[in-house]
Amino acid sequence: MNKTDLISDRSILNDFLKMWPLEKVRQMTLDEYVNVKNTETFCQYVETKTRSLGSIKGLPGSIKFGIYKRKNPKKPKKNAISDDIHTWLPYYGTDIDEVFVKIKQDLINTIVSIQKLDYEKIDNIHLPNIFKWKVAFLYSNEGFIPIYKKDALHLIAASLGLKINNKTKYSEIHRYIAKSKPFGISVFDYMRTLYSEYKIDKQEKIIRTSLRRKKRKGTFEKNRQSQHRKGTSEYVAEQFHNELQEELKRILIEKYGPPNVVLEENYVDVKVLQPNEIQYYEVKTAGYAEDCIIQAIGQLLSYINFEHDTRNKKMIVFGKNDPTLFEREFIEFIKGLFKDISFEYLSLNDLIKIKPSP
């Protein structure tokens, strides 16, 4: 995929998030959620307007939204509940107003859970998997690979080495495949690479008939083309950035004391002052450590360049996800570039390492 394709994918994602921020989802009406011949509904955006970000076209039909408005009111769906114009999943009850309240709450829980990296909670949300995981990806800031159909996910994960059965959770599969993404390519590029490698067409129909595991060939070649790295969603990034920054500040204060932790001084997200060292923390919300580092490293160097204090300097990029194997190699490469400046990548899971001992 070339640079133009990547910009187009991220433009589509930004357009969706500008149209449907979480605050709007909270206030959304049933007609805004799903309707007939209305291209501006939430479900139209998820299924049709963002199709290049992973297709959910096809089965199980419109019931995947939890509720839908029938084109032909005289043809209600079997194994579902219907009124004069709508059909919905029996799990949500019989009163249409209460049904939509529950469905909207499931949507909100999906969005909040993915922003908090609680993939496992999404497993327990009652919306159909293909739909809720597409929604999760759209609000994840490119946090995992945008493939949603069960057969495709099982084929890819099994071929990559995950032991798969019918009880394997989607959260486990998405985390596993996400870790396999090679360094230097976007999640969209990797999605299309997997489509091609496993012979899955644009509608995600699996042409390949065998699920036998194969030994993977070497890693994909590094994409050496320049890439557009602007954050995929200013809305999501700003919201989650503030949460990460506050959590980081709280833990650093516990360890170093309030006088030694400075927030937003000269644009530095968090700065820690020690007798022999100054630590500069830059908080990034991208889905992968690689993107966080690329976005942050120039800023950190700029902060140090304008710092006249003679103490040793340490740059820390703080992101939400653990680095993959490829990204760990990237981190070690960066560490080797600097002789007088220390460098570190810190994930949410790493925060426990800097907490003070009881």
Image (spheres, rainbow, N blue to C red):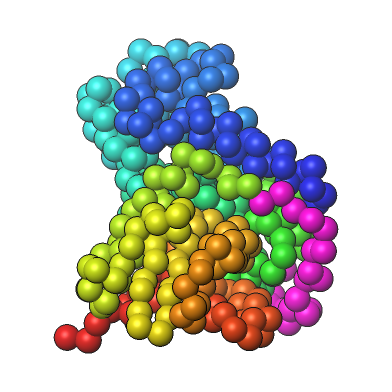
Q: Is residue 151 visible?
A: no
Q: Residue furthest left?
A: 358
Taking 17 as reference, is 53 left or right? right
Q: Which residue is found at the position 75% from the left and 76% from the top?
A: 219
Percent coordinates x, y for residue 122 in the rendering: 37, 54
Q: In which quarter of the image is the C terminus?
A: bottom left
Q: Which of 152 and 177 is in front in this view?
A: 177
Q: What stretch is highlighted in magenta?
A: 209-229
Q: Residue at 37% of width from left, 39% of height from top?
A: 107
Residue name at image x 51 percent, y 31 percent:
18
Rendering coords of residue 270 (x, y %): 39, 62
Magenta part mainly helix, strand or loop? loop
Camera-side residue of 181 and 81: 181
Q: Where does residue 343 sit, x and y in percent of width and height?
A: 55, 78
Residue 43 x %, y % = 50, 29
Question: Does 265 appear in magenta?
Answer: no
Is residue 258 in sight in this rendering?
yes
Residue 228 is a magenta residue: yes
